[in-house]
Image (tube, rainbow, N blue to C red):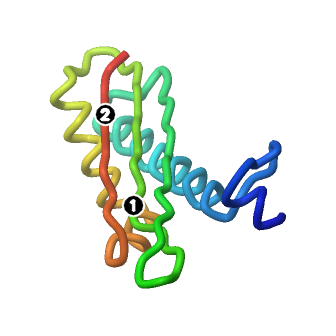
């Protein structure tokens, strides 16, 4: 990893921030899939993206937010119920819990 690949042109390389975003999206997806299955609505498909924002704060780079976006295929579940399940999953996800006190976490959840 180089400074340029992290803050300028990635050149196909990843960054610690991308790894955090991927870990968060994966953890959240697992929590959501488990919660939906437990409630009798196992998902056919979940696609989750995590987007980390890295800003300069007080002269230092800091992760300031994570945006989770999930699109799900869940038979027999209305969009409002899916959003509620996604919020519950966000609250129960260990990675969300690890980050929640220091950064803003937002969630967008839609039915495919």
The circle drawn on residue 31 is none
Give the left or right position of residue 50, taking residue 14 as reference: left
Q: Quadrant of the N terminus?
A: bottom right
Give the left or right position of residue 24, taking residue 4 as reference: left
Label 2 secondary element: strand
Q: Is residue 103 above or below residue 58?
A: above
Residue under the image location 50 percent in, 39 percent down: 49
Residue 103, horizontal then vertical, whole percent: 36, 69
Residue 50, horizontal then vertical, whole percent: 49, 46
Residue under the image location 49 percent in, 55 percent down: 52
Residue 26, horizontal then vertical, whole percent: 55, 48
Q: Is residue 58 above or below residue 33?
A: below
Tell me the distance, in whole angstroms, between the alpha carbons under discs 2 and 1. 17 Å
Quarter of image, res 3: bottom right
Could you say which is closer to the camera, residue 33 or residue 5?
A: 5
Q: Quadrant of the C terminus?
A: top left
Pointer 2 or 1: first along the chain: 1
Callouts 2 and 1 close, C-beta under 8 Å: no
Residue under the image location 67 percent in, 64 percent down: 16
Label 1 secondary element: strand
Q: Nearer the viewer, mark 2 or mark 1?
A: 1
Which residue in the structure is indicated by mark 1? 65
Residue under the image location 33 percent in, 58 percent down: 105
Could you say which is closer to the camera, residue 66 or residue 5?
A: 5
The circle drawn on residue 109 is 2
Q: Is residue 33 above or below residue 97?
A: above
Q: Is residue 51 above or below residue 100?
A: above
Pointer 1 local density, CA inside 10 Å: few below 14, some 14–19, many at least 20: some
Could you say which is closer to the camera, residue 63 or residue 84?
A: 63
Residue 63, horizontal then vertical, whole percent: 48, 68
């Amino acid at each position: 990893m180089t400074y340029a690949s992290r803050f300028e042109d990635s050149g196909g390389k990843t960054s610690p921030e991308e790894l955090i975003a991927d870990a968060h999206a994966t953890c959240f997806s697992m929590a959501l899939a488990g919660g939906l299955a437990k409630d009798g609505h196992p998902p056919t498909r979940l696609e989750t993206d995590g987007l980390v924002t890295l800003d300069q704060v007080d002269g230092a780079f800091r992760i300031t937010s994570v945006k989770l976006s999930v699109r799900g295929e869940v038979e027999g579940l209305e969009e409002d119920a899916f959003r509620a399940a996604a919020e519950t999953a966000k609250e129960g996800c260990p990675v969300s819990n690890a980050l929640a006190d220091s950064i803003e976490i937002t969630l967008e959840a839609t039915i495919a």
